[in-house]
Every structure is written in structure tokens, then in C-alpha cells.
Amino acid sequence: MCLVATPPGEPGACQPQWDSRGHFFAAAGQAMRRILVENARRKKRLKQGGELARQELVDIPIELPDVHEDLLALDGALARLKSIDPQAVELIHLRYFAGLSLAKAAKTLRIPSRTADRVWVYARAWLHREIAGPESQRQEK
């Protein structure tokens, strides 16, 4: 994937073809997702010490999920969501991976901001349920 033009003759030279601003941000979001997911996979490999747990030298124990586990779970959930609601996945790419505000993401996708807000709420709830599993819903009630 080529996001920025490179001079001809250099290794990996390319000229990106952007149809619109939305096309660019969609590609940037996809690229960021791939980079983050591949980095998480690389760090989980045995060669990189993936079976070892990092130990902080802090006196206060904080129980947080491993970021790499979250990214891999998010990637899998996004793949499943894409078959259900592709527009929601595009909105997540623009918001989470490309860093756009909800209003800018709506403008990029050419949808009303209220629709983007509704899709964002739905996608967040769907991803939470998918990643956390049904046990978390029982505990919240």
C-alpha cells in the first residue's frame, strides 16, 4: 500500500492514486491497523519472548489486559464485524486508527453526523460484547 509518493528509481517507488480525501484516510486507517496488528503479533512470537510476562518494578500492582492481546482480539472482531456492517468497520478505522473526530469521519464517509454517531455507538457496543464475551454482560447486570 502506497500512502506517499516516492521518486521514480528508488526501491518501492509508487505514485498513490487518491479519489478523494476519504479514500486517503480510509487507506491510512487500514495501514495503521495492519502496522499495529503485525507489531502485536511480532511481540507475541516465542522468538521475541512472547511466552514471557513482563514484570514492572512498581510497588502498586495494576491489573490491565495486555495491549497486544487487545489488538489481536480487536483485529479478529473487526474481521467478523465487516461481514455484518462494513460501514461500521470503516468508521472505526477512521476514528481509532486514523485518529479522526466523529464529525470528520462522517464527512469523510459522506454520511450525516447523526448516522455516524449511531453507527459509532453500535460498533463500540458490538465490539465490547464480542471482545469481552458474554460473561461481562452477566456481571454488569
Image (cartoon, helix red, strand yellow):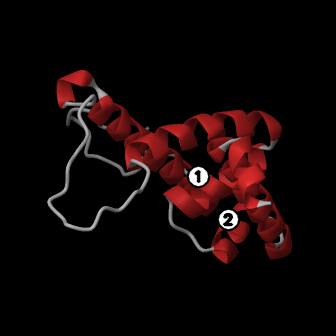
**Residue 22 at x, y percent in the picture:** 63, 59
In what element is the residue under mark 1? helix
Which disc number belongs to residue 135?
A: none
Mark 2 belongs to which amino acid?
A: Thr
C-beta proximity under 8 Å, tags 2 and 1:
yes
Mark 1 belongs to which amino acid?
A: Ala
**Residue 93 at x, y percent in the picture:** 59, 53
Mark nearer the N terminus (2 vs 1): 1
The quadrant of the image that shows the C terminus is bottom right
Q: Residue at x 29, y 46 (%)?
A: 6
Give the class, few, some or many, for how many residues have Cα within 10 Å of label 2's Cα (few <14, many ≥20).
some
The quadrant of the image that shows the N terminus is top left
Quarter of the image for residue 120 reads: bottom right
Q: Residue at x 63, y 55 (%)?
A: 92
Which disc number belongs to residue 108?
A: 2
Q: Nearer the viewer, residue 42 or 63?
A: 63
Q: Nearer the viewer, residue 91 or 52?
A: 52
Q: Nearer the viewer, residue 48 or 16?
A: 48
Q: Residue at x 48, y 46 (%)?
A: 70
In what element is the residue under mark 2? helix
Q: Does residue 112 lie above or below 51 as drawn? A: below
> Which residue, as the protein is rendered here, is positioned at the far left?
57
Q: With 41 as the anchor, is 125 left or right in this view?
A: right
Q: With 27 as the anchor, is 64 left or right in this view?
A: left
Q: Which residue is mark 1?
A: 26
Can see residue 14? Answer: no
Give the class, few, some or many, for how many residues have Cα within 10 Å of label 1's Cα (few <14, many ≥20).
many
Whole-angstrom CA distance, mark 2 to mark 1, is: 9 Å
**Residue 31 at x, y percent in the picture:** 45, 45
